[in-house]
Amino acid sequence: MFERKPRSEYEAALLSKGKRTMPSGPRNPTRSPDYAMIVKRAHGSRIEDCSGNEYIDYLLGSGPMLLGHAHPAVVAAVRAALDDGSAYLLAGEACIELAEKMVQAVPCADKVYFQSTGTEATFFALRLARAFRKRDKILKFEGGYHGMHDYALVSTQWTWTPADFPAPVANTAGIPRSVLEEVLVAPFNDIETTAAIVEGHADELAAVIVEPMQRTIPPRPGFLQDLRELTRRLEIPLIFDEVVTGFRLAYGGAQEYYGVVPDLCALGKSISGGHPIGVLCGRDEIMDCAGPAKLMRGEGVLLSGTYSGNPISAVAALAVMQELAAPGVYEQLFARGRRLMDGLAAVCADLGVAAVVSGEPPAFDVWFTAGELGDFRDMLRADGKRQGRFAELLMDRGVIKAHEKFFVSTAHSDQDIETTIDAARSAMQALIEAEA
Ligand SMILES: Cc1ncc(COP(=O)(O)O)c(C=O)c1O
């Protein structure tokens, strides 16, 4: 039985040092300072803090550790590569091989361009689309998250007071008003409202960007297909943000899993086993806007970065892709994720707790709501306080998760899943008792 050890003096000292030197302090797995921790190490499905607590980890670095932490094949590949230098600016052998493998894996990819983060990948995807379409506005979906740049941090999951569609809401200070004027917002999973907005602004729109599974809300049957048909008819590039879903829902990402191919897509996280990467992929016609012919005429799009195509991230990604391509990997990942989703749903049903376990087996969460979870406003209606408290009670029982997600890895064993379901039952009981 897991018993959370009290915070050690050493960890407490690290936390206060971090608070002094970083504006928002060290990142906390929950919203309560009581659960703040400093990581000592992580292996496989486990993460350990500096007080000697070892948790089953469903935070997984916010997704990248699809194979679990410190996977031996990835560590070996990276270790070997370090002897040959870690930044060239110029492309190395691994970068060329990775680009080819990406083109083979990702349905929309005729060409790829590497960056270091998912934020850069969505940012460059939007720039490319604007240059291609020679228009400025973009449409995104309320509650969707595309990283930290100015176009992205608008009407995301941190929108407590939504505006009427299609008006955007800035989620941070510091976004220029001129950027907000270029962002339109539509409701996810509502093709009628989306179509009305897109058709009304078709002459101004450079792109529509969407998380094919928005946070943990899967697309309703037909939604992505209809969005594809709408954007194709109006010749507006459709961008899938696959930073979470890429290589996680399937080897070919959500576009393979849901069977809808966008014009461009942004990838990151799961590809490279925890080594910084972003990948922008897409159709030749659009990607070639960053090619030499257009650049020479002064019409091209500049995409560059010191760490783009970084050789260490590239060898890590090749190692991850090799593991993921082995037979049965996704079947096992989905079976374990499904078992956990079903187990959590059974816990809620047995204890009479109104909740929806929403998402796909490799990434999902428990939302405390009696209704359906079809869009961001349904999420807002769910009991976020309960969701946060449930996460803390899980930590008391040796399980750590992301704020609004369980990420499952190939390193989670059947035993991990069963232990987690038992912890969830006990946490849910404690939650009910505390509220009584
Ligand atoms: C869907 C999605 N897009 C983009 C990003 C940004 O990626 P990064 O944090 O690597 O910049 C994230 C990060 O959580 C994400 O979930």
Image (cartoon, rainbow, N blue to C red):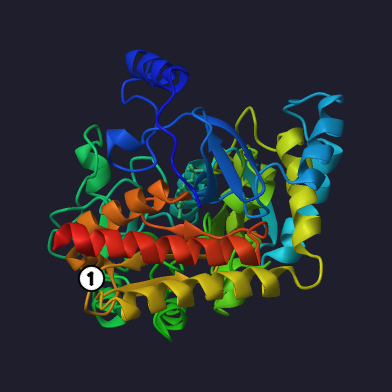
Residue 65 vs 343, above or below: the answer is above
Residue 137 vs 50, above or below: the answer is below
Query: Does any portion of residue 246 appear in the rendered image?
Result: no
Figure quadrant of residue 256: bottom right
Question: Most extreme residue toward the front, as rendered?
Answer: 1
Q: Position of residue 91 (x, y in %)?
A: 78, 35
Label 1, secondary structure: give it: helix
- Name the residue: 22% across, 45% down: 170
Q: Which residue is mark 1?
A: 378
Q: Amino acid at mark 1?
A: Asp
Q: Position of residue 38 (x, y in %)?
A: 47, 29
Disc 1 residue lies near ligand 1 with CB under 8 A? no
Q: Position of residue 33 (x, y in %)?
A: 29, 33
Q: Position of residue 245 (x, y in %)?
A: 54, 62
In the image: residue 59, left or right of residue 96? left
- Name the residue: 66% across, 68% down: 252
Query: Does any portion of residue 388 appear in the rendered image?
Result: yes
